[in-house]
Amino acid sequence: MNALPLLSSYLDQALSEGASDITLCPGEPLTFRIHRRLHRFDPIPREAFNELFWDAINHEVGSFPHKGERFRFIYYRSEDGPVLELRHLPKCVPSLAELGTPPAFQELIGSDHGLIIVTGKTGEGKSTTLAAAIDHLNRTRDDRKIITLEHPIEYRHESKKALIRQRELGTHFDDFPEAIEAAMRQDPDIIMIGEMRGSASIAAALTAAETGQLVLATLHTKDAAGSISRILD
């Protein structure tokens, strides 16, 4: 994506302010989330919004580069008009130690098969935790082929010791359950699922785990007990 001038200026400002998230809505103040607090700036011109933003991104969910950084976005409509939400994705994947994951988690991701679910509310670091897990395996295991299924691809992984293939919904596949089933025929040791959505995705993930792959996935639940209940439901 080649960001147009106004959008580019907002991204530059967000980077200089250290914002993690950006909210753009025509006629509403430009809003940054900085250290969990919301900071509001000048309103966004209504007449420029559709032309500058929708024409620039051209789809509803994705990610794009800007001056060596990456941003994830989602575009949707609300009662106040169209909204573009962006999240700054750090260049470097944090380590498991930096995230404070327990040693047991590092042992779990070294398993040969099974299902590991990272849970939590939106914005609590589920995707980052999985990215750190993939990076750890990529740096330490030369016997792992990893296929990721994401929406969108947030962190780019270059194969190091492991072999990594990243796939994105809408670009490389059209449906999570079918992509999970296809991945089982692509000689994986590990399948990473950005998010298990609905019964078909969960069933496909369970099948993959049962047939010998290690499956890493996220689920929008607040704790482990909630994850079990949702899977059973």
Image: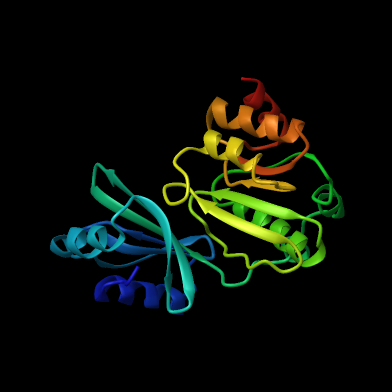
In x, y percent, where is residue 159?
Answer: 67, 66
Query: How many labels, in total?
Result: 0
In x, y percent, where is residue 172?
Answer: 47, 50
Evaluate whether residue 197 shows in this view: yes
Q: In this view, does 224 lie above or below 41?
A: above
In front of the other: 149 or 53: 149
| Left or right: 186 as drawn, with respect to 57 | right
- Which residue is at a point 78% across and 64% down the rendered structure image? 97
In x, y percent, where is residue 91?
Answer: 57, 72
Tell me, what colour scheme is on the image? Answer: rainbow
In the picture as drawn, the residue positioned furthest to the left comes out as 47
- Which residue is at a point 69% across and 30% down the rendered structure image? 206
Q: In this view, does 171 lie above or below 222?
A: below
Figure quadrant of the C terminus? top right
In the picture as drawn, the residue positioned furthest to the top comes out as 233
- Which residue is at a point 81% across and 65% down the rendered structure image? 140
Figure quadrant of the N terminus? bottom left
Q: Is residue 118 above or below residue 91?
A: above
Evaluate whether residue 220 shows in this view: no
In x, y percent, where is residue 131?
Answer: 65, 58
| Left or right: 132 as drawn, with respect to 169 | right
- Which residue is at a point 23% across and 60% down the rendered structure image? 55
| Left or right: 136 as drawn, with respect to 8 | right
Q: Is residue 13 above or below residue 217?
A: below
Asked which quadrant contains residue 41, the reply is bottom left
